[in-house]
Structure formats: C-alpha cells, structure tokens
Image (cartoon, coloured by chain):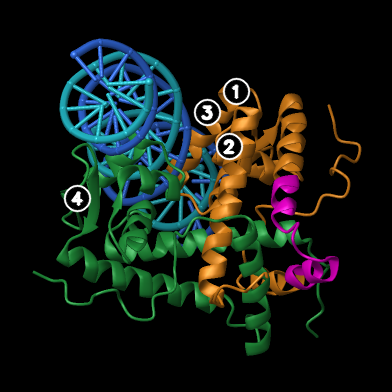
Chain colours: A green, B orange, C blue, D cyan
DNA sequence: TTTATTTGTTCGGTACGCGAATCATTCGCG
DNA sequence: CGCGAATGATTCGCGTACCGAACAAATAAA
C-alpha cells in the first residue's frame, strides 16, 4: 500500500503545489469577497503601511497596476491613502479599521487552508519542508508578501 | 555566518515559494509571447488533447473562461479545436504543430527557472523536497497541470 | 534657478474570469 | 419513436488585473 506511484521531480512537485496554494488563496478571497490580489494587498499591509512604489516592488506589479488595485480595494473601504508627511508626492497605503479586521480573517483563513495542505505529513516532515522551502525563499529574495505575525502589530494605534 | 534569520513557518514558506513559481511562469510567458494561462494551457495539452470541460476541471476554470482562453490561444495558432468523433457536441482541444514546439520550449524554460530556485539546495535535499511536496500534491489531488515528460507522447500520431 | 529624477495617476488596450442565458446534441424513458 | 432532461460549448455583459506610454506634481541635483 501507499506505493509512491512514480517519483515526482522537484519541479513538478513545486509547480503543482503552487497550483494548490493559488487555489487556497482564491478560495479565501471568495470567502471574504476579495480577489486574491486584494487579499494579498491586505496581507502585505498588515504589519505597516507602504508607499505605492514599495508595494509595486513587493508584489511585482507596475505602478499603474497598483493604482487600480488600491483604488478598488479602497472603494471597498479596506485601505486608505494617506499623504506621506515627509514627501509631498508620495502616499502611504494603510489598512482602515475594517481592513485590519478583514486582513486578519483572510490571513488566518489562508493560513489554515495552506496548513491543511500538509496535513498528510508528520510533524517532523512538515518542519523539514519548512526548512527547505525557507532556504529557497531567502535564497531567491522572495518579497515579503506573507510574513509571520505572532501578534498583530496593533500597539496603541486605533483612532 | 549564514544565520537562519528566524525559522519560517511552513505556511509562509509555501506561500512565498508559490510567489516565486508564479513569477517564473510569468517570466517564461513573457519570453515566448504567452500569458501564464496560455502557457499553462499548452503544458496541459502536451501529452494529449482534452475536451473543454476536462480542461476546465484541470485548470479550475469555468467553462465560459475556457472558451476565451482557447480562442485567444487558437488565434495565436498554437491550439486547434477538433470535433470529437464520438460526441457531436464536444470538441477536443489539441496543440498545432507550432504549438507543440512552443509548448516544449515554454515547458523547458519554466522547468529550468523553477529548478534554479532550488539551486541552493544539495542534491539530497532537493530530493527530499521533491518527496515531501510530492506527497502534498498527491494527497490533495492536485490536477495534472504539469507532468513528467521524458519523451513527448508522440507515438505514431501525426496526420 | 533650472534641470532631472522620483512618485503617482491617467489613459488605452488586452487578457482573465465569472454567472446567466442560449444553442445544439445526446441521453433517457415512456 | 418522440419528447423532455441532461450535457457540451458558446455568447454576452460585467468587473478585475496588468501593462506601457504619457502626464502632472513635488523633490533633488546642478
């Protein structure tokens, strides 16, 4: 039983895992009325606000693409453009109150779904996987589109 | 040196790896004048033709979305709709000659890029990674959007 | 100050993806 | 056989996503 049904190359395994993670993202989005991109934007903004250019860099999008994404997400009431106090040209995109709440829900739901993907692994294996993928991530300078959030960065902020 | 800079959770590692693989797909697409979706379509069709509904299931798309994707890819000359000999309603989507060539190039380029992501791993580690991700893939019934192709399934077919 | 650079937005265009409605074919069953 | 149901695909309308080029505004550099 449990025959390995042909060994799978690392490339195939990575691509098909990517497919699963993408689907998890999309599912969480549907669950909360967000597109995957909007959800990702919220996740990125969870630790702190960012400028448009910074966001473009992190998400791998052109500036012009960001404008629209932020527009639409702002129209939903989840993010807000704040003027940068130090630079009259720049804006800082920040989560609104409802945006913070939704971001955490979306983030948690996505984490749960992705975590479940590895349900078939033993704890030690999951740890080994995290270590190996972690090296890939840091070795390739993957942008911090998803980060560890032990405690939501909410130290004495809200209005 | 080489301090592990905080252990990364398996979820974060998977999500950020997904980001890298998506980028690789997009890059290969740009390289060959394809969108990532079109490239993925070509890869799926490499082993054999499929019906629209089958494709929708594999790629996780609604039927109406497939129509457009196939239309656009067909307009580029890379796929073709063939009538299903057994069912007058159905069509089978197949690669054209140029489509076969391009699919292999795109496939190879993407493989190379994804492979390079794991350049920082030792051979044994890469194998371990393949094994772990492979279990995730099969355990979650990830569609075969990417497959092993030792030799292109070209056994005595062409017109 | 002038000129360059940086930051964002606007604009035009294409692709993507969905649900609802529609057409054609096939299936099922009386 | 014939007629309604199910199936395979397409069409349509809509919103999202993404890009490059052109632009405006503010800052930085000369």
In the rendered structure, the answer to whether residue A133 lies left or right of residue A33 reads right
In the rendered structure, the answer to whether residue C25 lies left or right of residue D24 reads right
Asked whether the beta carbons under mark 3 and mark 2 sit within 8 Å of each other, the answer is yes
Asked whether the beta carbons under mark 4 and mark 1 sit within 8 Å of each other, the answer is no
Residue holding disc 1: B76
Sequence-wise, the earlier of marks 3 and 2 is 2
Tag on residue B72? 3
Tell me which segment is drawn in magenta: B111-130
Q: Residues within 10 Å of mark 2 (few under 14, many from 20)?
A: many
Between tags 4 and 1, which lies in front? 4
Between tags 3 and 4, which lies in front? 4
Asked whether the beta carbons under mark 1 and mark 2 sit within 8 Å of each other, the answer is yes
Chain of the residue that carries numbered disc 1 in the rendered image: B
- Secondary structure, mark 2, is helix
Give percent across and percent down for residue B71: 52, 29
Q: Residues within 10 Å of mark 1 (few under 14, many from 20)?
A: few
């Amino acid at each position: 039983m449990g025959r390995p049904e042909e060994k799978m190359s690392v490339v195939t395994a990575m691509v098909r895992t990517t497919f699963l993670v993408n689907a998890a993202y999309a599912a969480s989005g549907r669950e909360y009325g967000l597109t995957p991109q909007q959800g990702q934007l919220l996740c990125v903004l969870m630790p702190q606000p960012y400028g448009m250019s910074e966001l473009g860099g992190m998400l791998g999008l052109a500036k012009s693409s960001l404008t629209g994404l932020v527009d639409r997400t702002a129209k939903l009431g989840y993010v807000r453009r704040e003027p940068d106090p130090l630079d009259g040209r720049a804006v800082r995109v920040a989560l609104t109150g409802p945006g913070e709440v939704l971001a955490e829900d979306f983030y948690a739901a996505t984490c749960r779904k992705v975590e479940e993907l590895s349900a078939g692994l033993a704890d030690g294996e999951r740890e080994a996987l995290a270590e190996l993928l972690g090296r890939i991530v840091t070795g390739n300078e993957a942008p911090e589109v998803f980060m560890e959030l032990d405690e939501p960065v909410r130290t004495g902020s809200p209005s």
